[in-house]
């Protein structure tokens, strides 16, 4: 039985198989839950209103499986996709679990590891294409270091570029039409990871052979681990036409990577994020990369998945209310009109404007005296979020 916050597939909510499949293992303790099979995840998530799932190669096909086994698993999974009406919009490669990746994959000092990582990625791209994925994510969890003496950081960047260029060409060669989405993280599991923020990724992308094919996959927790304002991060990616995918979860500041249920901590920031995604026309998946608390059994996992989507739906409704709120809109209208009689057109440079602007006088003391009503505005948002508006 649903209410107005019950999701439908139109919302494009997706979960990684590894998220609901997370067994609650941590560095200090064993798994607390049984494995949930990919097919069971499809069935359960579909009933909850999700649109699809995403996967690493090894979330579906175990590492080292024979070709025969792989094909059987993929066939069964495709049937389950049809049966449940679910899709797989994004695929990715596990380049972090096997010990061979202990010093990175594409940036490893060992050339054989770099080449093996390319091979594994090409095979995983083949798998993703076979199940309909259109976005391919690159999260370089092990692409980092503890010992800077071991590797010139410029060399690591060059190695990453070589790998990305190679795989862009493979994408073209195979006619897959993937959009590549690069996911930044500052640390964990490495002490420092190369390209630590989405901003670093955006700069790097412009140096690639096929920059147009490559965008970003920002994650709430990862940017917040760096102390950044996630709403600003995503706004810049959207403005650059580079938001190809997004990883939604939550995170307390200054902690290890927590992967908390979406909007369970930073309600206000996540409100601005949802408002931005909805208003920008972002049309991609709303993907949750989080997991249930270690205290939970399987039922708790589905409560977690439901909660991620429910909070998104509630914040989406709050964004609509924000747009329709006469007091909030009244203040915003006043703010937008501040100084609108200033006579210069600086959108296009010409020397006459520059001369006139240099000669102009501004009543800066009076301008500076003006109160900006941000206290009132912010409290209105708080009232809205706390449910009394
Ligand atoms: C993490 C990452 C991963 C990636 C995933 C898909 O911190 O572990 O967020 O969950 O998103 O590997 O690339
Ligand atoms: Mn993460
Ligand atoms: Mn992620």
Image: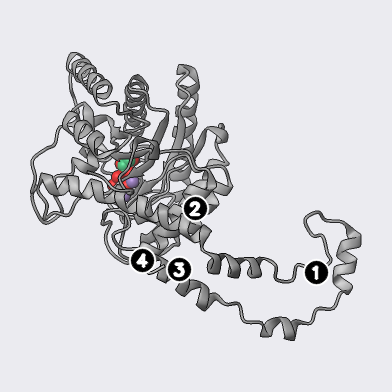
Q: Is residue 140 left or right of residue 234?
A: left
**Disc nearer the start of the sequence (2/1):** 2
Counting residues from the N terminus, which is met first, the one under dot 4 or under dot 3? Answer: 3
Image: 75 above or below 149:
above
What's the CA distance linking mark 2 and mark 1?
29 Å
Q: Earlier in the sequence, mark 1 or mark 4?
A: 1
Front residue of 326/127: it is: 326
Name the side, left or right, on which 348 lies relative to 237: right
Q: Position of residue 187 (x, y in %)?
A: 33, 55
Q: Position of residue 191 (x, y in %)?
A: 31, 56
Say which residue label 1 marks. 342
Ligand 3 is within 8 Å of the C-beta of the residue at disc 1: no
Mark sitting on residue 387 = 4
The mark that comes first in sequence, 4 or 2, is 2
What residue lies at 62% left-to-right and 81% top-to-bottom?
A: 371
Q: Which residue is mark 3?
A: 381
What whole-number distance in Å separates the C-alpha atoms at marks 1 and 4? Answer: 39 Å
Bin the neighbour count of mark 3 within 10 Å (Cα to Cα): few under 14, some 14-19, many 20 and up.
some
Asked whether residue 140 appears in the rendered view, the answer is no
Examine the image and state in which quarter residue 127 appears. Answer: top left
**Could you say whether the residue bearing mark 1 is in a helix, strand or loop?**
loop
The span from disc 1 to disc 3 (Cα, nearest Å) is 30 Å
Give the SS element for disc 4: loop
When the figure is inspected, residue 314 is found, relative to residue 105, above or below; the finding is below
Residue depicted at x 24% and y 22%? 83
Q: Is disc 3 placed on a helix, strand or loop?
A: helix
On screen, residue 259 above or below 15: below
Q: Are marks 2 and 1 in contact (CB under 8 Å)?
A: no
What residue is shown with label 2? Answer: 276
Residue 117 visible: yes
Mark 4, ligand 2, within 8 Å: the answer is no
């Amino acid at each position: 039985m649903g209410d107005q916050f019950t999701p439908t597939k139109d919302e494009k909510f997706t979960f990684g198989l590894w998220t609901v499949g997370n067994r609650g293992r941590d560095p200090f303790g064993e798994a607390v839950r049984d494995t949930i099979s990919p097919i069971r995840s499809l069935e359960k998530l579909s009933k909850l209103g999700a649109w699809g799932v995403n996967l690493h190669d090894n979330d579906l096909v175990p590492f080292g499986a024979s070709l025969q086994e792989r094909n059987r698993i993929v066939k069964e999974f495709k049937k389950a996709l049809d049966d449940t009406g679910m899709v797989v919009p994004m695929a990715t490669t596990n380049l972090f679990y096997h010990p061979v990746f202990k010093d990175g994959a594409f940036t490893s000092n060992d050339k054989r590891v770099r080449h093996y990582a390319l091979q594994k990625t090409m095979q995983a791209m083949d798998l993703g294409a076979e199940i309909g994925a259109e976005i391919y994510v690159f999260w370089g969890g092990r692409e980092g270091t503890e010992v800077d003496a071991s590797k010139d950081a410029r060399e690591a960047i060059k190695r990453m570029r070589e790998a990305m260029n190679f795989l862009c060409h493979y994408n073209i060669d195979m006619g897959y039409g993937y959009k590549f989405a690069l996911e930044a993280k500052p640390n964990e599991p490495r002490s420092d990871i190369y390209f630590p923020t989405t901003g670093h990724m955006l700069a790097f992308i412009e140096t690639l052979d096929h920059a147009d094919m490559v965008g970003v996959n920002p994650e709430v927790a990862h940017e917040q681990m760096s102390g950044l304002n996630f709403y600003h991060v995503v706004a810049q990616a959207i403005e650059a036409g580079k938001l190809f995918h997004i990883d939604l979860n939550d995170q307390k500041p200054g902690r290890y990577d927590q992967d908390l249920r979406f909007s369970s901590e930073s309600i206000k920031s996540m409100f601005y994020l949802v408002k931005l995604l909805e208003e920008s026309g972002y049309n991609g998946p709303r993907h949750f990369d989080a997991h249930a608390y270690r205290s939970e059994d399987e039922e708790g996992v589905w409560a977690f998945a439901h909660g991620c989507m429910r909070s998104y739906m509630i914040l989406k409704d709050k964004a609509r209310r924000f747009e329709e709120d006469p007091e909030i809109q009244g203040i915003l209208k006043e703010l937008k009109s501040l100084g609108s009689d200033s006579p210069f057109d600086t959108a296009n440079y010409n020397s006459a404007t520059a001369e006139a602007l240099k000669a102009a006088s501004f009543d800066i003391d009076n301008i500076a005296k003006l109160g900006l009503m941000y206290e009132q505005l912010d409290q209105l948002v708080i009232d809205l979020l706390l449910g009394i508006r």
